[in-house]
Amino acid sequence: MATTPSKWNVTDMPDQTGRTVVVTGANSGLGIATVEALAGAGAHVVLAVRDLKRGEAAAATVRGSVEVRRLDLADLASVRAFAAGWHGDLDLLINNAGVMNIPEAATKDGFEMQFGTNHLGHFALTNLLLPHITDRVVTVSSCAHRMPGTPRIHYDNLNLTGKYAPMKAYSQSKLANLLFTLELQRRLAETGSRLRAVAAHPGWAATNLQGHDASALRRAFMRVGNRLMAQDSRAGALPTLYAAVQDLPGASYVGPDGLAEMRGAPTLVGRSAAASDPDSARRLWAVSEDLTGVTFPEPAAPARA
């Protein structure tokens, strides 16, 4: 009788000894689960965190080789300082940090907080570190990129000034993550680089991210949903880990395989038409370069033989 193949789990990760990884937003939730798995597989993992004290406390719980460095994605000066302090090869960058459905706020550079943190901070960080990266960039997006109401990039008002709605802002930032991945992969391929840009989403994972929602009603709903429907942070991190270590095509998108992509084992998943638009991806890239002052460099990794 034929046996059913087992679904991919953290125990299926190949040995990561000798690899160096940066994980943003690594002191809790999906971030620390990602760190634990990679360090447990032998990688040296850098926790890139805004709060060093919390980062050190989180790092102390991890078995393996880890270190903590400060990075505030809502402050481009901090992003530049982090990148300027990097020396040597970096095998893997995981753009995990994010804020979700928060009240209206601005980054230190004046950008809407969700777009500025989730997209622009990671856009700048990736491009500044790209000359050091030798394998791939994984950016964490969300099912929210295709929320009802045809999410789009509001190029005429990226800060949503006068029209701010927490969920609209979050959806825009997560759509931007996928368009960024699409255009980054196109640029890498154009240069003949062997680097890959891929994306992942966790489905519905019970983390502290939902606790900062601007709506008390949504916070209550999330608390119930976290108990009844969500998977835990370790399961939620599996799509990110799969995207980080499996041999996938560039621009792949990984998510859970069950319950409308809310939970399950990692697998390749689809994305919205808006997240697949190469013209919008190019436009977003150009706008992001203008806003951050950071441009695409020549990557270090040589082309495949």
Image: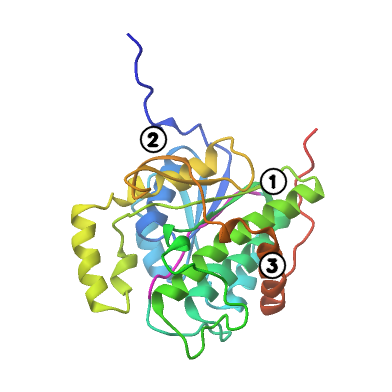
Locate residue 122, reporting x and y percent: 58, 65
Please tell me which of labels 1 and 3 falls first in the chain: 1
**How are the residues colored?**
rainbow
The reply, left or right, for residue 90 in relation to residue 243 is right
Locate residue 47, reporting x and y percent: 48, 58
Residue type (three-letter) at the residue carrying disc 1: Leu
For the point 49% across and 58% down, the residue is: 141
Disc 2 element: loop
Please tell me which of labels 2 and 1 falls first in the chain: 2
Q: Which residue is mark 1?
A: 195
Name the image quarter holding residue 250: top right
Disc 3 element: helix
Q: Which residue is mark 2?
A: 9
Quadrant location, the C terminus: top right
Residue 285: mark in rendering: 3
Alpha-carbon span between mark 2 and mark 1: 24 Å
